[in-house]
Structure formats: structure tokens, C-alpha cells
Amino acid sequence: MKKAVKFALLALMLLSLAVAAVGCGGKEAPKEPAKETGKQDVAKTKLVVGADATFAPFEFTDPATGKYTGFDVELIQAICEEAGYELDFRSMGFDGLIAALQTNQIDAVISGMTITEDRKKIVNFSEPYYKSGLVVAVQEKNNQIKNFDELQGKKIAVQSGTTGALHAEKATSKDKITYFTSSDQAMLELKNGAVDAVVMDYPVTAYFIQQGNKDVKMVGEILSAEEYGIAVPKEKTETLEKINTALKTLKENGKYGEIYKKWFGEEPK
Ligand code: ARG
């Protein structure tokens, strides 16, 4: 009798264990969720996108996660999702981005890149996605430089290949300009007092100061209205079309506005 009870208990225990195991298995995420919908079985086309990820809040490495993040990063993710691309995001020096496009190392650039007439001769741009401009940054304690016109003869740090560099070249002689691969380095040079000023995109400079660099300030007006666009090689007209269509959809369905608000705290301009 006792033995029978023991056996029954054991059998019950085993049964409940088995049920638990099956239950657990059922809760596990299916390994291939794509198969369930039968929709995403087809491999997505890869879109290799280049950026210089030293340009917060547009593209930079999140110090907490070590991952690329920023307005451009989230926008291109959304565009790829919308257009059915698999995103392959790569960071490289800003002054090498256009050459990388021309040699087909990358399919597109989203890098706070200003749409300019010169660039338009060699690459195509999407519809504009951000209104920007340049600004002069100096040390907080500097009372000499109050605007762009007072840069003559002053030492300026810039990021190579940028519109900021072009403007600095108009303001002072080339031998007074120090060119950096990353925008962070240009800002550091200013903080260290090795240069008198930096000419850089307004939203990036404002973000830098806001992130706790109160020893830096912006002076004068925001220079020249600029617009950012996504650049693609001249011959990739289909890619450009897909990007533009996705961008338009995201602007209409509110997703673009959502990402914009997240990064800039206001509605798109
Ligand atoms: N808007 C400027 C330009 O097009 C600077 C862009 C720099 N972007 C970057 N990710 N570092 O020249």
C-alpha cells in the first residue's frame, strides 16, 4: 500500500515536471518569427549607410551602450524599415564619405550632410530632412570675437571637408585653420585654448554646450541657412526614390515628427 502511494506520488511529480517543461517551451520565443507570418522570408536588400559618428545629436556612440545613436541614426532606421531595407550602418571620417559613395563602398550617407551645389555635382540628395546653419563658438571667457566678421587673423578649428571648414577659409587665412577628422577633436582644441574659435553646425554646437561644456559659448548670428539631405551615388536613382518615398511617408504618418521631437525637444521646423 505504502509503495503504491509512493509510486503514485512519484508519477504525479514526473507528470507535473513534464507539464512544466512543455509549458516553458511554449513560452519561448519562436526561433524564426519571420516564418510565422510567411512575409519576411525573402531576404531584405542591404543598404550600407555611411556616417561620421562624432556628430551628436545626429550620429554618435551612446557611451552607455556603445551603440550608434542619434537623430540621423533613428531616421535612417525608420526609413529602412519603411522601404524594406536591412540597414548596415558604418562610421567613417566625414571627408571620406563622398568618395566612399562614388566608389560604391556605401549606398548612402546620412551624416548631417548639407545639401550644397558643389556636392550636388557628384552625388544626389534626398529631399531635405533638417534645417540647419553654421555658428561661431569661442571660449566662454572670450570677449574679443563677437561674430563671424571678427575671425580674420584668428586661429580656427574645423572638421575636414565640412561647410564649416569652407566658411572658416573665407574668414581667415588657411594657415590659421586646423583641420580635424572628427568634430569632437575640433571642440576639444577650443576648450584647450589652442584655437580661438570653431566654425560648426549650430545644432551640434548647441548640443555640445548643453551637454555640460559651459566653458564654450556661441557668438553672433547663425550663418547661412543650410539643409541636410541623404546622399546617394548619382546612378542609384531607385535607391533615392525609395528613400524619398519612405521619408515622405514618415513625415505624413508622424514618425518623423516623433524622432525629431525626441532629439530636439520641439516640432520639426
Ligand atoms: N553640415 C556640415 C557639412 O555638411 C557638417 C557635417 C558634419 N557631419 C558629421 N557627421 N561630422 O559639411
Image (cartoon, rainbow, N blue to C red):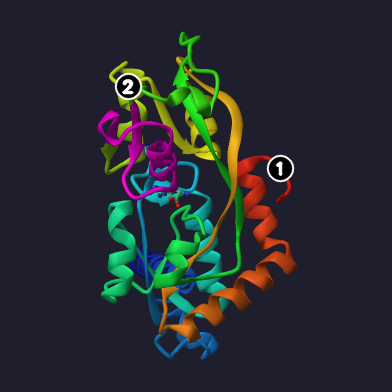
Which of 105/123 is in front? 123
Q: Secondary structure at mark 2?
A: loop
The amino acid sitting under disc 2 is Val
Residue 26 picture location, percent across and down: 48, 74
Marks 1/2: CA distance? Answer: 33 Å
Residue 193 sits in quarter: top left
Q: Is residue 147 magenta?
A: no
**Tag in front: 1 or 2:** 2
Q: Quadrant of the N terminus?
A: bottom left
Q: Which residues are magenta?
A: 156-178
Label 1 near ligand 1 (CB < 8 Å): no
Q: Residue at x 44, y 25 (%)?
A: 151
> Residue 55: where, in percent of width, then height?
42, 43
Please say whether residue 175 is one of the residues in the magenta stretch. Answer: yes
Q: Kindly identify the amino acid type of the residue bearing the numbered disc 1.
A: Glu
Residue at the disc numbered 2 = 195
Horizontal side of 191 relative to 126 (left or right) equals: left
Q: Is residue 20 left or right of residue 176?
A: right
> Does the residue tagged 2 have its C-beta within 8 Å of any atom of ligand 1?
no
Q: Residue at x 44, y 62 (%)?
A: 118
Q: What residue did someone put label 1 on?
A: 266
Question: Up-down: is 57 above or below 80?
Answer: above
